[in-house]
């Protein structure tokens, strides 16, 4: 194809020769671009209709208290035991026992001054309360049963240092016990009226407390995991059974007696299922694998 153009200023005519396909391509290029964009839009719409994009879910922030630092709890309990165990005539023994806890920021004997005579022994200690005044610092309330002062409560501040080691964050302090209240009832619960279920639960509890694993197995589901108590007990009576909130478990008040004649009132939660028309037990009070 031949293009004819007039050269400006001279009035001359210039004839240029171009291939016909180039001219057609240039003239049809806008139409081709619009068609391509339309096709891309159709493909995108189909893709979103068939497999819409899924929103990215952020990992939920941890809810609830931080997991307990068992090592720090043990450190506080060990210090409390050594701090409260002493013999007045042997002050150096007490100082040596406390020296690993003291360090440069505390007196070598943790500020403990003993009388010239007398002694005190600790029968047991237990961490009963914890708080975290600042990151990496825990203040534990330790209950300690002593043979002379009786039951005392001691707060011990423990800090986890940058290298992961534990250290006291200050001197201990004697405090009172945490607040306690009277026992509370469970509220209104639905009573179990199914006689077959009552029979299975009572029989399972008798075999469970007696430690009769083979007899108990007859009332367990195939995937049940049960850990039998080592203290063999004889069931004297099983009170009225009630459904736990939400169903799926039965609550039972059991009167039992050990071989020494000591009687106990015990509350049990028994998970039950009915896989093949027969009531079976899937757990008793606890999950051994958790």
Image: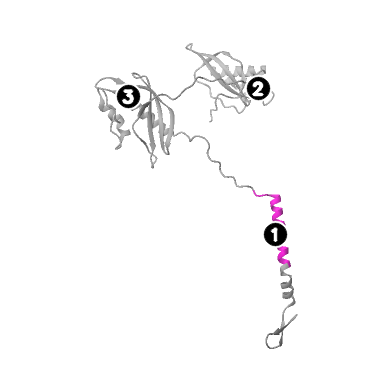
Q: Secondary structure at mark 1?
A: helix
Q: Are marks 3 and 2 in contact (CB under 8 Å)?
A: no
Q: Which residues are magenta?
A: 31-53
C-alpha distance separating marks 2 and 1: 61 Å
Q: Which mark is residue 85?
A: 3
The residue tagged 1 is 40
Q: Is residue 65 magenta?
A: no
* Residue 141, picture quadrant: top left
Q: Residue at x 69, y 51 (%)?
A: 48
Q: Within 10 Å of the Cα at label 3, are there few (<14), some (14-19), or many (20+) other Cα atoms?
A: some
C-alpha distance separating marks 3 and 2: 54 Å
* Residue 59, picture quadrant: top right
* Residue 83, picture quadrant: top left
C-alpha distance separating marks 1 and 3: 82 Å
Q: Secondary structure at mark 2?
A: loop
Q: Position of residue 193 (x, y in %)?
A: 67, 17
The residue tagged 2 is 279
Q: Which is more foreground, mark 3 or mark 2?
A: 3
Q: Earlier in the sequence, mark 1 or mark 3?
A: 1
């Amino acid at each position: 194809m031949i293009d004819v153009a007039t050269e400006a200023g001279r009035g001359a005519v210039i004839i240029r020769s171009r291939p016909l396909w180039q001219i057609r391509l240039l003239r049809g290029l806008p139409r081709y671009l619009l068609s391509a964009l339309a096709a891309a839009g159709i493909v995108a719409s189909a893709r979103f209709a068939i497999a819409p994009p899924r929103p990215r879910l952020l990992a939920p922030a941890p809810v609830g208290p931080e997991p307990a630092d068992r090592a720090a709890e043990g450190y506080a309990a060990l210090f409390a035991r050594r701090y409260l165990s002493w013999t007045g005539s042997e002050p150096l023994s007490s100082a040596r026992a406390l020296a690993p806890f003291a360090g440069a920021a505390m007196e070598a004997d943790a500020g403990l001054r003993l009388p010239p005579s007398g002694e005190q022994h600790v029968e047991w200690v237990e961490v009963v309360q914890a708080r975290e005044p600042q990151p990496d610092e825990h203040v534990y309330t330790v209950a300690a049963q002593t043979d002379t002062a009786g039951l005392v409560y001691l707060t011990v501040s423990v800090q986890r240092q940058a290298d992961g080691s534990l250290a006291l964050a200050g001197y201990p302090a004697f405090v009172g016990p945490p607040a306690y209240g009277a026992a509370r009832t469970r509220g209104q619960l639905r009573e179990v009226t199914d006689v077959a279920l009552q029979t299975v639960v009572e029989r399972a509890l008798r075999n469970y407390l007696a430690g009769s694993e083979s007899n108990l197995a007859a009332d367990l589901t195939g995937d049940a995991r049960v850990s039998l108590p080592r203290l063999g007990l004889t069931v004297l009576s099983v009170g009225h059974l009630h459904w736990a909130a939400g169903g799926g478990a039965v609550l039972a008040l059991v009167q039992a007696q050990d071989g020494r004649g000591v009687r106990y009132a015990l509350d049990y939660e028994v998970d039950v299922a009915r896989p093949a028309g027969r009531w079976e037990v899937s757990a008793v009070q606890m999950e051994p694998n958790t």
